[in-house]
Amino acid sequence: MLNSGSAPGRPSDSSVFVMLGDCDHGAWGLCFLRKSEDWKKNRVILNQEMMAPEVLKNFVPMLEAVAQDFIGVLNKRVKQQKSGNFSGDISDDLFRFAFESITNIIFGERLGMLEEIVDPEAQKFIDAIYQMFHTSVPMLSLPPELFRLFRTKTWRDHAAAWDTIFDKADKYTQNFYWDSRQKRNFSKYPGILYSLLGSNKLPFQDIQANITELLAGGVDTTSMTLQWHMYEMARTPKVQEMLRAEVLAARRQAQGDINTMLQLVPLLKASIKETLRLHPISVTVQRYLENDLVLRGYIIPAKTLVQVANYAMGQESSFFTNPGNFNPNRWLDNDKNNTYFRYLGFGWGIRQCLGRRIAELEMTIFLIHVLENFKIKIQHLSDVGTKFNLILMPEKPILFTFLPFKQNPVLG
């Protein structure tokens, strides 16, 4: 990882990239830029808008508003079931939550994905993202020329998914672009799109391409991690109670101020790391070496593709004691040597996930509100299994039960 250079390269010869190269969607965003100098220029500018500490403070109230609305959705479900709790599969609700969160941050406005009646066009976008992930897997393991030659159903479905993603994202970007030009004056942070447009550091086409990729990458990834996190909490009630105790203590100490609370929940943040150890979104981290590397006596030439197996490393007992256990405390060890480079849930270095800080904020705020308001159980304690659809997903639906936490329910 340390040998990957200042503008590290990743594989770009899979069928997915070939297919996208055939599509007429204008500029490339960060995910698909092939020239390292173009990638680095875009990345530096986007880091300032999405990862700088002073910018992250703008995102907190936006993410909290969506999290509070999600609690409202669960409370409605409890009332509807008339049993004092709510049981069911909430994976679709989590997708909508994640989409509402990322669009609120990008556009500075809500799309209403948590309303009872959801915008059909927005739902098409979410469905297209799912189809894109689902059809990517076979395309990563076969020669691109086969897809070029035969244009299989998988290829056509994948291309159709990307067409929908680009089309919907372009419409959102164009609509909010013209709205923002008319408003001019904002009483609150107007969102990443307006901030990028106002800085004049990137041409509109590049902004549009990067916004598309942020939208496409900001739904399944966070929603799936939250689903896995609640699954592990439900299977480990002792840890769930420890996390709840920390959150409630933080609420009292911070006197309800969410920004202060975020500094007082180290165990909760560690639990997100622990979830990504057990259920990493990215199975591997891939980089091309910038220079020759000697590794355990083997010479690995420059330009060689190397992979760090995130999932396998997370299950390895030589790195983690009792690796099958959900134990967030392992990340609070003061000895950095015990955890250094063992957590790569968002990648590493300059090419780590651009949305990392937003995702961490989004998940932390979400879990704060869920833990304050509900105890979580699952109907079947047996392992739900894991399948690979470009990201790791449950093989079977997870059926949660949410029991209102009556001691100190907090909605905001």
Image: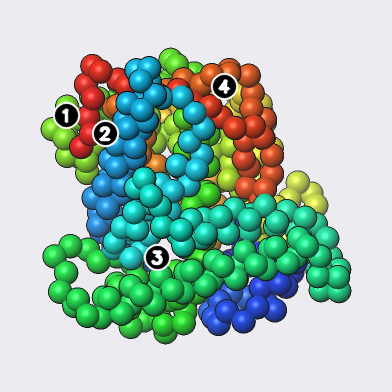
The quarter of the rendered structure image containing the N terminus is: bottom right
Determine the secondary structure under disc 1. helix
Q: CA distance from mark 1 to mark 3?
A: 32 Å
Residues tagged 1 and 2 counted as in contact (Cβ below 8 A): yes
Q: Residue at x 29, y 61 (%)?
A: 109
Are there few (<14), some (14-19), or many (20+) residues within 10 Å of tag 2? some
Are there few (<14), some (14-19), or many (20+) residues within 10 Å of tag 1? few
Looking at the picture, tell me which residue is in the foreground, 354 or 8.
Answer: 354
Q: Earlier in the sequence, mark 1 or mark 4?
A: 1
Residue annotated with mark 1: 253
Residue annotated with mark 4: 325
Q: Residue at x 65, y 78 (%)?
A: 23
Q: CA distance from mark 1 to mark 2?
A: 9 Å
Q: In the rendered image, is residue 283 in sight?
A: yes
Residue annotated with mark 2: 264
Q: Earlier in the sequence, mark 2 or mark 4?
A: 2
Residue 411 picture quarter: top left
Q: Earlier in the sequence, mark 3 or mark 2?
A: 3
Relative height, residue 407 to residue 265 (above, below): above
Residue annotated with mark 3: 47
Percent x, y of residue 45: 39, 73
Residue type indicated by callout 4: Asn
